[in-house]
Amino acid sequence: MESILNWIGVHQQMIYIVILMIFLGIEVIGRVPAVLHTPLMSGANAIHGVVIIGAIIVMGKADPHNYVALGLGFLAVVLGTLNVVGGFVVTDRMLEMFKKRK
């Protein structure tokens, strides 16, 4: 328990920034009209491929015996991949709506 409290004390500013980013993101997305929500989110999901690259870098630099870092890195790669694929699927469905029917 003491090590957790020490970690929080050392990274206190970073925790505050993440919490503020969460509130800012909720506020920005909440003010987007429903018509624009799908195109914006599908584009944002496709951009999240950076998460995959970051997770691969973290896994590559992690100690081979640090199973927590490797597990979280693997989870980030899987979830990032699902996010990117989902973004492209939504974008493809959106573009299908604008094609002329034969």
Image (cartoon, rainbow, N blue to C red):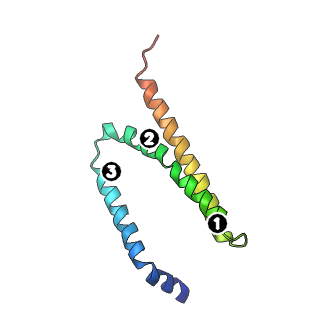
Q: How many angstroms separate mark 1 from mark 2 (CA)? A: 31 Å
Identified at 47% across, 36% down, the residue is 90
| 2 lies above or below 66 | below
Residue contact at pointers 3 and 1, CB within 8 angstroms: no
Q: In which quarter of the image is the N terminus?
A: bottom right
Sequence-wise first label, 1 or 2: 2
Residue beneath the point at 51% across and 52% down: 50
Give residue 15's quadrant in the image. bottom left
Residue 1 in sight from this viewpoint:
no
Give the camera-side residue of 86 and 48. 48
Q: Label 2 near label 1: C-beta < 8 Å? A: no
Query: Furthest-bottom residue in view?
Result: 2
**Residue 22 visible, this angle:** yes
**Mark 1 vs mark 2: in front:** 1
Mark 3 or mark 2, which is nearer the start of the sequence? 3
Percent across and percent down for residue 74 are 64, 59
Crowd around label 3: few <14 · some 14–19 · many ≥20 (10 Å)? few
Residue of label 1: 61
Residue type at mark 1 is Lys
Give, as a three-letter code, the residue at label 3.
Answer: Ile
Q: In this view, does 58 lie above or below 78?
A: below
The picture quadrant where one finds residue 24 is: bottom left
Q: For the residue carrying disc 1, how many other residues have a C-alpha within 10 Å: few (<14), some (14-19), or many (20+)?
A: few
Residue 97 appears at what percent x and percent y? 42, 25
In the rendered image, which residue does mark 2 sit on? 42
- Residue denoted by label 3: 29
The x and y percentages for residue 19 are 37, 68
**Amino acid type shown at disc 2:** Ser
SS at mark 3?
Answer: helix
Residue drawn at 65 percent across, 68 percent down? 62
| Mark 2 vs mark 3, CA separation in Å | 13 Å
